[in-house]
Image (cartoon, rainbow, N blue to C red):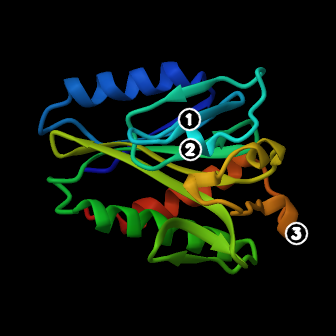
């Protein structure tokens, strides 16, 4: 059963989160999986066990939302591609570690298409280029179904990352496609990444 792809454009983070919760709560064993492609207005989000100590000097202009995903603190803003993965992992015969690896590999393959060599790290989920983080993953599993997903930095203002310990790692630097010589529209990047994700999802 192919996943339904939804291009949702710029969406409020809180509203997207509540919509994901509702979708996951109301789905049944025959509900098709969905991938939601969004961008968010500037927002910091903390994972379920996120520590506020990783918020260093945040601006009053950027809200902070405590979410129910895994992981620590991150930043979302325009120019960053967010893919929410609403998947029945039981039906797909995936465990959480396999899903994380699948999403990392999809980002690595996508970046390679644009001439960027990226790697995953066993000690810190996500995707890195020369030690700088370019892609993040934060998931929640409920009733054997996943929601939340990944973010991939394309062409955004990275300065708000300076006010946090990204993903809880002090001194971790971030990067993006635009700073690595790749000029790509975020909608095009979304299409490329979705193809990579769906190629790895068991059918």
Mark closer to the chain start, 1 or 2: 1
Q: Mark 1: which secondary structure?
A: strand
**Residue 8, x across and y down, in percent:** 57, 30
Q: Residues within 10 Å of mark 3 (few under 14, many from 20)?
A: few
Task: Kindly identify which numbered label has been placed on residue 73.
Answer: 2
| Quarter assignment of residue 174 | bottom right
Mark seen at residue 58: none
Q: Give the x, y percent position of residue 7.
A: 56, 35
* Viewer-nearest residue: 35 or 42: 42
Mark 3 and mark 1 lie on one chain; the one further toward the N terminus is 1
What residue is rendered at 84% in x and 45% in y?
Answer: 159
Q: Are marks 3 and 2 in contact (CB under 8 Å)?
A: no
User: Pointer 3: what residue?
Assistant: 181
Q: Of tags 3 and 2, which is closer to the observer?
A: 2
Which secondary structure lies at badge 3?
A: loop
Q: Classify mark 2: residues with Cα within 10 Å, few (<14), some (14-19) or many (20+).
A: many
In space, the residues marked 3 and 2 are separated at their CA atoms by 27 Å
Asked which secondary structure carries label 2, the reply is: strand
Q: Residue at x 32, y 50 (%)?
A: 2
* Quadrant of res 183: bottom right
Q: Label 1, on which residue? A: 45
Residue ID at (27%, 64%): 202
Q: Is residue 73 above or below residue 179?
A: above
Label pair 1/2, CB-CB below 8 angstroms: yes
Front one among 109 and 5: 109
- Tell us which disc is closer to us: 3 or 1: 1
Front residue of 80 and 65 = 65
Q: Alpha-carbon neighbours of circle 1 within 10 Å: few (<14), some, or many (≥20)?
A: many
**In terms of image quadrants, where is residue 53?**
top right
Quadrant in the picture for the C terminus: bottom left
């Amino acid at each position: 059963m192919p996943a339904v792809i939804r291009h949702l454009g710029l969406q409020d983070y809180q509203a997207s989160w509540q919509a994901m919760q509702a979708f996951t709560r109301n789905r049944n064993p025959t509900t098709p999986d969905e991938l939601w492609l969004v961008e968010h207005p500037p927002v910091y989000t903390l994972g379920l066990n996120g520590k506020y100590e990783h918020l260093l000097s945040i601006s009053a202009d950027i809200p902070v939302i405590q979410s129910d995903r895994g992981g620590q603190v991150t930043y979302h803003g325009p120019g960053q591609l967010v893919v929410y993965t609403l998947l029945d992992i039981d039906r797909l015969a995936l465990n959480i570690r396999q899903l994380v690896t699948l999403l990392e590999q999809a980002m690595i393959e996508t970046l390679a298409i644009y001439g960027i060599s990226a790697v995953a790290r066993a000690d810190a989920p996500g995707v890195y280029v020369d030690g700088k983080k370019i892609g993040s993953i934060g998931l929640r599993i409920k009733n054997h179904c996943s929601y939340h997903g990944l973010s991939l930095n394309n062409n955004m203002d990275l300065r708000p990352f300076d006010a946090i310990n990204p993903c809880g790692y002090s001194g971790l630097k971030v990067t993006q496609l635009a700073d690595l010589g790749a000029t790509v529209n975020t909608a095009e990047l979304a299409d490329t990444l979705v193809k990579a994700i769906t190629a790895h999802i068991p059918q």
